[in-house]
Amino acid sequence: MLQNDLSSATPVAGHEPTSGATAMAGKTDAAAARLLKEEGYNELPAASQRTVSRIALEVVREPMFLLLLAAGSAYLMLGKPSDAAMLLAFVVLAMSITIYQEHKTERVLEALRDLSSPRALVMRSGRHIRIPGREVVRGDLLVLEEGDRIPADGILLDAHDLLVDESLLTGESIAVAKSVHAAGQSGADDGIKVYSGSMVVQGGGRAIVSAIGADTEIGRIGKALQEQVTERSPLQQEIGMLVKRFSIIGVVFSLGVVIVYALARGDWLSGLLAGISLAMSMLPEEFTLILAIFMALGAWRISKSQVLTRRTPVIETLGSATVLCVDKTGTLTENRMSVKAIVAGTVTTVLETSGTAPGAAVRVIEYAALASEIAPFDPMDKAFHRCISAFAPRSAASRADWQLVHEYPLAGDMMAMTHVWRVPGSERHVVAVKGAPEAVARLCRLDQLQAAALMEQVGQLAAQGMRVLAVAEAVYEGSDWPEKPLGFAFDFLGLAGLADPLRPGVRQAVTECRDAGIRVVMITGDHPATAQAIARDAGLRCDTVMTGSELDALSDAALQTAIHNLRVFARIRPEQKLRLVNAFKAGGDIVAMTGDGVNDAPALKAAHIGISMGQRGTDVAREASSLVLLNDDFSAIVHAVRLGRRIYGNLRKAMTYVVAVHLPIAGMTMLPLLFGTPLAMAPVHIVFLEMIINPACSIVFEIEHAEEDVMRRPPRPVSERLFGVRDVVIALLQGVGLLAAAAGVFFYSLHRGVPEGEARAAAFSCIVLGNLALIVGNRSHLHSSIRLLFMPNVAQWWMLGAAGLALFAILQLEVLREVFHFAPLHADAMLSVVIAAGLAAIWFELAKAAYRRTKVPC
């Protein structure tokens, strides 16, 4: 094997076996497990977790809980201990439900945090494996690759062209060169050390872990990092404003009720209870609960479709995406590159899975492999290594003792990779290069006729959907390396055509995006003909392809105009992605961008929705993104957009329901005061209703399926409010309708001379039944409540059944009737309740019909 091969045979795809000494085999699994148990996880001291006790303490401090305590105290002062005891029982039950929901949400968030933690490539028992960074232990053998976040402090064992970004520690933006040769040099001790939190921006190497967690250099400054405050998202700000407004209105009205009641009836304690009842009915405690649960469980649901949400506010933006910029390789295609054709001179050789190839074709394969990374990360490099093993195994074995001594990576002005190899026992160095045909033609100094003939061959392969690379060789003596690859005298060898099949389902996903008003834009470094062939297979419009050189020739204003009708960009360098993102944004688009490399990070960060690759992406790209595509599959992105629209739509339905259901509760608290009748609502009634409202808005609506046409609607304008005028109007219409029904039953019953307990029971029953109708009706604004009863939603039936049984028990059991201050309901009163609730349900359907006449947002 090659001396610099840092890989091993197994769990990490694409890494070749190592024949290094057993000392370099890394820790055994047992030893690592023992150290992990003794020294703990490799993580910085975190802010204290939200345990059950801490959540309970937070609930106790909530305004609703304090109001309930005040109501219980008032009941005791009025000499009603049974009412106070029942209220306390309801308080405990409501607290338990809230604590359960909050704890479930916290567990989901913790699981997502574990998923999103950086991964580390280590040697364990002689094999390379990817493990969570928090499971790295002292003495582990780290394998450092370009784009990785270094998980712990360590001492370098070997390195090649290793550059590390230590700006997180030092504040210096210039990458630092690392080398084992720095050992022993004055002032250069840091040259052989690598530090946790640093980023590998070039090259690779191996290091032994010397410190983890709080003992690392970054651990000493970790406290400052933990104190950074995350800015609230627009949705959080909107919810916060709604809560503030409702709270102010509730406090003002409640104080007014206390004063009016006391002055009119001369009873301050009863006035206090009436004011507390009104405050409880108007307090929008569900708003923040809904947002927290929907975002956390939404991120969890999206993760089930192989998309990890690193920043939950991005869920808000998914439904607004208008442009989806995707890489071709590995996202639209399967990322299973294989060498399909070799062109040497005028002879084209089509390669089968195995067999033989002409000598000239084998030479192209050999030098393509020599120009590939030793520990391949790129799928093309992996394909060349597999190809040389299949078609020229003896040739690979004969070069086992060659040593890679210098390399020239891809650059903006030279889209080719060059490796310089030392041949043992000779002063001669073999130089291999592979890259874009036009770049290699320039290195080989082909004349105009030769270059034209070459590009004709390239076009023939590219038209078949192949990615085409050119290969060349050179010989160099001495070790005074040229500054650039142009300093070598290259001889052209031939072309290699690589095929990567389109992923199943891509064409359907592209069609779904088109129906949803989302423009899919393919960005690739491939030849325009290759890009056009793949785009055509994927169902993208590809009449015109813009290349990177054409993009550079345009001004920002001209580019913004040109890209509006373009769907395919070819020969694009990573840094040009940022310009494309900014051009789309300048045109008013909401941009989602995929990327996997170090140089993709700026574009991912600039996009409204940055999407990194989980399988082939670097830590740099993942940390710059808001979503991580765990399986690198384009269809998963489209599914995430669908889920984002579903989550936002269900959140809007839940908010509409909450506002609608609080109106009749607040109204039935105030109207008896205004008309001088006995009170209809007390704290115990409101607490019971809250135990229906909280699970309904956070469970029934959260699990609701997306509307059938959710991906046939245009993207939601990003400026559109969650709870806009249309939503306020339908909530008011529904709430006023239920209030009219409950008030009609209550005042009609009193007018007929029935006992106040029976009138109160009738009004309460009407509100409960209307509440259940609101739950069903607000599940969808497109379908009737009757149809919704037969559409799947398990939580709905649990809620309807539990609330129905509870209402039946309250009306039938004397001990509960006394607690709720009810009298038995006679048949005529029950009939009036059913009729009123039925009329309210019909009114809800009329309000929904009016809602449907306007544009339904995502």
Image: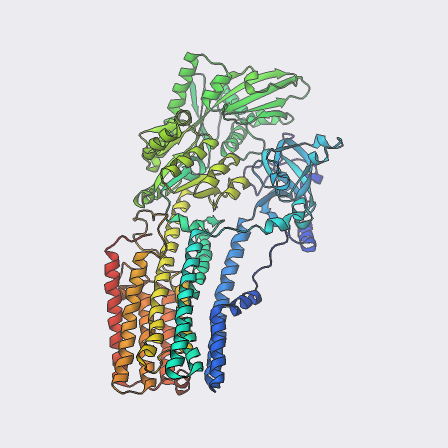
The image position of residue 463, as x and y in percent, is: 36, 26
Q: Nearer the viewer, residue 735 or 395?
A: 735
Q: Nearer the viewer, residue 714 or 469?
A: 714
What residue appears at the point 46 percent right and 86 percent down from the top-left corner? 80
The image position of residue 5, as x and y in percent, is: 62, 33
The image position of residue 302, as x and y in percent, is: 44, 52
Which image quadrant for residue 788?
A: bottom left
Left or right, 26 with respect to 115, comes to: right
Left or right, 215 with respect to 57, comes to: right
Which image quadrant for residue 322?
A: top left
Look at the picture and state if 521 lies above or below 351: below
Which image quadrant for residue 484?
A: top right
Left or right, 36 with respect to 597, comes to: right
Look at the picture and state if 233 lies above or below 406: below
Q: Nearer the viewer, residue 568 or 13?
A: 568
What residue appears at the point 44 percent right and 58 percent down from the top-left corner? 240
